[in-house]
Image (cartoon, coloured by chain):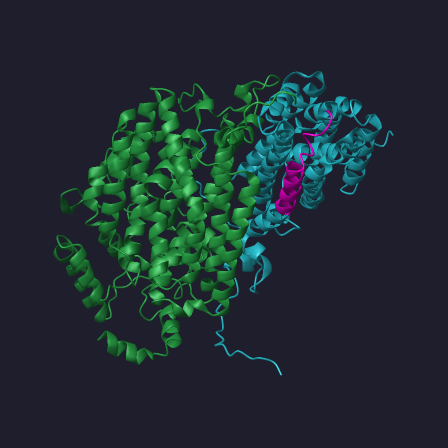
Chain colours: A green, B cyan
Amino acid sequence: MAVQNKKLNLKDKYQYLTRDMGWEPTYQKKKDIFPDEDFEGIKITDWSQWEDPFRLTMDSYWKYQAEKEKKLYAIFDAFAQNNGHQNISDARYVNALKLFLSGVSPLEHAAFQGYAKTGRQFSGTGARVACQMQAIDELRHSQTQQHAMSHYNKHFNGLHDAAHMHDRVWFLSVPKSFFDDARTAGPFEFLTAISFSFEYVLTNLLFVPFMSGAAYNGDMATVTFGFSAQSDEARHMTLGLEVIKFILEQHEDNVPIVQRWIDKWFWRGFRLLSLVSMMMDYMLPNKVMSWSEAWEVYYEQNGGALFKDLERYGIRPPKYQDVANDAKHHLSHQLWTTFYQYSQATSFHTWIPEKEEMDWMSEKYPDTFDKYYRPRYEHLAKEAAAGRRFYNNTLPQLCQVCQVPTLFTEMGAPTKLSHRQLKYEGERYHFCSEACCEIFEHEPEKYIQAWLPVHQIYQGNCEGADVETVVQKYYHINIGEDNFEYLGSPDHKRWLSIKGIKPADEDKNAA
Amino acid sequence: MSIEIKTTSVEPIRHTYSHIARRFGDKPATRYQEASYDLEAKTNFHYRPQWDSRYELNDDRRTAIRMDDWYAVSDPRQFYYGAYVGNRAKMQESAETSFGFCDKRNLLTRLPEETQKQLLRLLVPFRHVELGANMNNSKIAGDAVATTVSQMHIYAAMDRLGIGQYLSRIALLIDGSTGKALDESKGYWMDDELWQPMRKLVEDTLVVDDWFELTLVQNILLDGLMYTLVYHTMDAWLATQGAEDVSMLTEFMRDWYKDSLRWTNAMIKAVAGESEANCELLQTWIDQWEPQVYSALQPLAEASVGIDALDEARAELSTRLKKFGLQSRGVSA
């Protein structure tokens, strides 16, 4: 090379090491190589405008990730060797892990598959490479979570068959249908759903509460995983923001499509997060912050700033955010009182909050807890004390879209059940809210396909006609071990023996 | 005398997850097992994919190959994510040393212009083939059903991106990081007669729908001929052209290919061993694709090491496939 040009800067060098390896095909039609790129109606005029959200060549990736893994597994080994499960705040905490392993970890695996797919679907090489890196990261999370909880599984119930349960158990169809919805959509909607709405807007309300919960409750294995995954998550978040900005900048026709996706996926995500709200307020013996505080900081403040920033593209905040904002005062309580009634069919235990916890909730929810929810717990506690611990034997009506039982109340009317219905091609469908109903109306042919667990039980597709058979045979929930009330459960007894407390003392303490 | 640290011993109530115990019994499981078996969703999918409504998500009909249980295909390297990145981190460390050494001593900028041109024309354009391999393996990772299978392919996808980046860096060493050499090299890939059969082949693989056909074509047939020809024979030939230092920079590829033979062989063995019907299908695909791969490499062999070297590579692949009861041409030599 006789003539030396200028040395490449970092940005250009990274482009040479990624997108420049791509080329314009001439032997096969581009449309045949990338058949999924336009059916959603998104118009991309120039992929070269794609800004790489991070610049990580494979050699650095291997190096950094291997260092992180080495440290992480050293902690896992130490945790198991020292029986770290004995040092958590209280065994009730483990129920948060049960929810995580059966509700969230399978989503990490689904994300791996989804990003591997989009890592092939886009004709822009830069975007493909970013997706592939997220694919392998998500595989990492799915696997390290199995390893982080492996030791807990050896000492507590309810963690033993998470992926099997994820495919079948009634409340796990909430996270599963959420991700199925995203994965069955086109590549641009998938990224808007998962990279933007989920990873960027809502991750502080999903991933972080579990990890902070672990930190507050002495769970070294899980919190170490959380710290180790933090830099991966940061990369995923930058991808989420870049995707949205890129699509919006490419063509003005993309704006209304993206707006509808943001409306939809904000709401889908919010409904999914209702499970996290009850985890935060009820399942953590040492509480990090209340759901309503978390919602204020991470959605109302941070999300508010984000949507202010997106205004210049013609994007407004998600359509039903007012309903979500109002719900922050009620969400966790409505969820927990529902799950309390259906513990015979869950892989985790439920319980009535202790007195100090109820006082904490009165303080965190001054306008709602004492007025609407404390009386319920007092009633349920009285029933339980009289030997009539309440289980609801009528299966709940599920929302056709989010698949949460239709348990929510109307905005501003906390004693009025929120319910919508409509007829489509002769069949009647039920919804938990205006927002879910609207999502259905936009794509009815998609949502009529939903595998609704309660319908499936009644139709006889779950290996039995009665709840007990379904729970045991179809769900693989070990009756009397994984399910029912926490007090008196094998987990509870084991914990008392770890702590050297005889059950009689405990009764005295509780009394 | 030995030191004895007293710890409290706690009896576990089970030794592993139920889904692992169903396969291997309730005994302490390996990290590979807990990370790899029965993690993906298998049933009760809610919606049909809008990009391909013929099948469900995670549908084993995305290939015509039939396996009673796709988990019969597993990784002899026992790579779960942590083991994989740990292994590659070591490999990249020695590659980094070699690149650093060549850079510091200006080993590539000092090469005669003619040799530099040969590198840019005959070696560096394989970075585009690597990108094709990256895309194909990402597709397979997204389509395959069992985690033991899909994870091997996402690792392969990332490996191929990495190899493409190492090849690109050879050009950056030649031109002192201006990008000019990569532009020149890409020109050969796009327009030089020598490369057109290969570029056509790669573009043809990008429209293959059946993911197992694709892994066979990409990871066994194409790699089988290409890695032997390029990173062994052509490497030796380049050394005779005065580019022996480049061998240091392609050592990663040789190590990598040796490693990849372990899982690709295990995969073919399990799939061909499953049924007569699988064998027949594999044979049909081999008959269809192997000659195309051979032809695509022909001009490159002729311009460098000669056609005999390609025939040798072909014979080697044929011997390898024979072990699994499969035939390919290549004994003609």
Q: Nearer the viewer, residue A225 or A408?
A: A225
Residue A22, compared with residue B26, is above or below; it is above
Quarter of the picture holding the N terminus of chain A: top right
Q: Position of residue A87 (x, y in %)?
A: 39, 69
Q: Total marks drawn?
A: 0
| Magenta region, main secondary structure | helix
Residue at image position (32%, 59%) is A343
Q: Position of residue A463 (x, y in %)?
A: 44, 52
Q: Nearer the viewer, residue A475 or A309?
A: A309
In the rendered image, residue B116 lying in the magenta stretch gets the answer no
Residue B2, compared with residue A163, is above or below; it is below
In the rendered image, residue B95 lying in the magenta stretch gets the answer yes
Look at the image and tell me whether residue A426 can be seen. no
Q: Position of residue B248 (x, y in %)?
A: 71, 39
Q: Position of residue B69 (x, y in %)?
A: 60, 47
Residue at image position (59%, 32%) is B136
Q: Nearer the viewer, residue A218 or B147?
A: A218
On screen, residue A142 versus residue B296, left or right, reads: left
On screen, residue B246 versus residue A392, left or right, reads: right
Q: Which residues are magenta?
A: B91-112
Look at the image and tell me whether residue A221 can be seen. yes
State the image quarter where residue B254 is shown: top right
On screen, residue A368 versus residue B173, left or right, reads: left
Residue at image position (70%, 27%) is B119
Residue A415, compared with residue A249, is above or below; it is below
Residue at image position (51%, 37%) is A132
Residue reaching furthest to the bottom: B1
Quarter of the picture holding the C terminus of chain A: bottom left
Q: Nearer the viewer, residue A146 or A205?
A: A205
